[in-house]
């Protein structure tokens, strides 16, 4: 369940009423809710009153949802740490097995042990600041270097190019661009939440510029880091930088 409000009391009242309907539905259909495994989280750019109560459900500062750790500040720290822990283990596996297999096999192992963790949900957590992503990029660099038995101080980019794989930053740009393309072409598998998120610049500006006819999307104005991480802002920016 999701609800947005700028007033704490309104938030509490609406969620309580909606939960009553959920409980009524479950009772009618002979279903039970495990309250011990049910909780809520308030996502806000400012700190809300800690006295907020939602139907006696425990409040959490972070929640694992469909395999992604979401924190109340959308800093994605827990998710980054989760990925880092997985990469530490799997990079170690590749480092040990590199003595017994060829480069082609190592590349296949990379796409089995490393790549899935770098891509899952990246269109969400990939928008966090580069300083938080640095630890993941470091592990990816270490993995690529190890395949070539390179020194830790060697520039990793040439090895990425030889393997024809993307860096973390470019994986993020690639996935966002793909999702933007789906929205643009009204793909049936795009969540309804994102329909209408992007607006063509030609539909906003009445005057003609080099920016409008490409076609590019209107980039919304932002006032904080939260705005800079929204899909409408990031998606339009990445799409604009893709050659025609």
Image (cartoon, grey):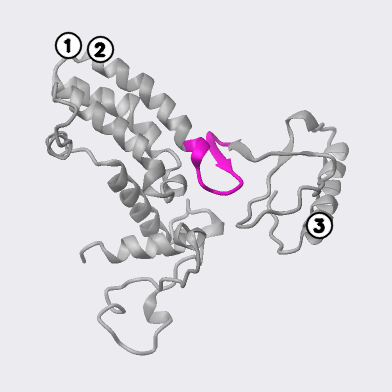
Find out whether the residues at labels 1 and 2 contact each other: C-beta distance under 8 Å: yes
Distance in Å between CA atoms under marks 1 and 3: 60 Å
Q: Quadrant of residue 3?
A: bottom right
Residue 92 percent across, percent down from the top left: 31, 17
Is 101 magenta? The answer is no
Which residue is denoted by mark 1 in the rendering?
99
Numbered label attached to residue 96: 2
- The answer to whether residue 185 is visible is no
Q: Earlier in the sequence, mark 1 or mark 3?
A: 3
Residue located farthest toward the top when viewing the structure as drawn = 100
Query: Is residue 74 shown left or right of residue 39?
Result: left
- The answer to whether residue 123 is visible is yes
Is 66 magenta? The answer is yes
For disc 2, the neighbor class at 10 Å (few under 14, some 14 to 19, many from 20) is few
Residue in the picture at 80% in, 61% down: 10
Secondary structure under tag 3 reads helix
Identify whether 78 is placed above or below 103.
below
Q: Which residues are magenta?
A: 65-79
Residue 27 percent across, percent down from the top left: 87, 37
Residue in the picture at 80% in, 39% down: 57
Residue 180 percent across, percent down from the top left: 39, 58
Residue 95 percent across, percent down from the top left: 24, 17
Q: Earlier in the sequence, mark 3 or mark 2?
A: 3
Numbered label attached to residue 24: none
Identify whether 99 is placed above or below 113.
above
Image depth: mark 3 or mark 2 in front: 2
Which residue is denoted by mark 3 in the rendering?
14
Residue located farthest toward the bottom when viewing the structure as drawn = 207
78 vs 235, nearest the viewer: 78
Residue in the picture at 35% in, 53% down: 178
């Amino acid at each position: 369940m999701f609800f947005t409000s700028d007033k704490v009391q309104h938030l509490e009242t609406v969620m309580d009423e909606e939960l009553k309907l959920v409980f009524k539905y479950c009772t009618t259909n002979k279903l039970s809710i495990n309250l011990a495994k049910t909780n809520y989280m308030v996502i806000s750019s400012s700190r809300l009153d800690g006295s907020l109560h939602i139907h006696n459900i425990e409040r959490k500062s972070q929640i694992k949802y469909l395999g992604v750790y979401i924190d109340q500040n959308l800093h994605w720290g827990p998710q980054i740490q989760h990925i880092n822990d997985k990469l530490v283990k799997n990079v170690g596996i590749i480092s040990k097995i590199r003595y017994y297999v060829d480069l082609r096999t190592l590349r296949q192992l990379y796409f089995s042990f490393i790549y899935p963790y770098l891509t899952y949900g990246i269109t969400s957590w990939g928008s966090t600041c580069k300083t938080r992503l640095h630890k993941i990029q470091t592990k990816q660099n270490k993995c690529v270097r190890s395949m070539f038995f390179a020194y830790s101080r060697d520039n990793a980019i040439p090895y990425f190019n030889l393997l024809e794989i993307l860096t973390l930053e470019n994986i993020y740009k690639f996935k966002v661009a793909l999702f933007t393309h789906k929205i643009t072409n009204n793909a049936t598998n795009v969540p309804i939440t994102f329909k209408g998120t992007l607006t063509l610049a030609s539909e906003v500006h009445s005057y003609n510029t080099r920016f409008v006819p490409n076609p590019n999307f209107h980039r919304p104005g932002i006032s904080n880091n939260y705005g800079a991480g929204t899909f409408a802002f990031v998606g339009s920016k990445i799409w604009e930088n893709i050659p025609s």
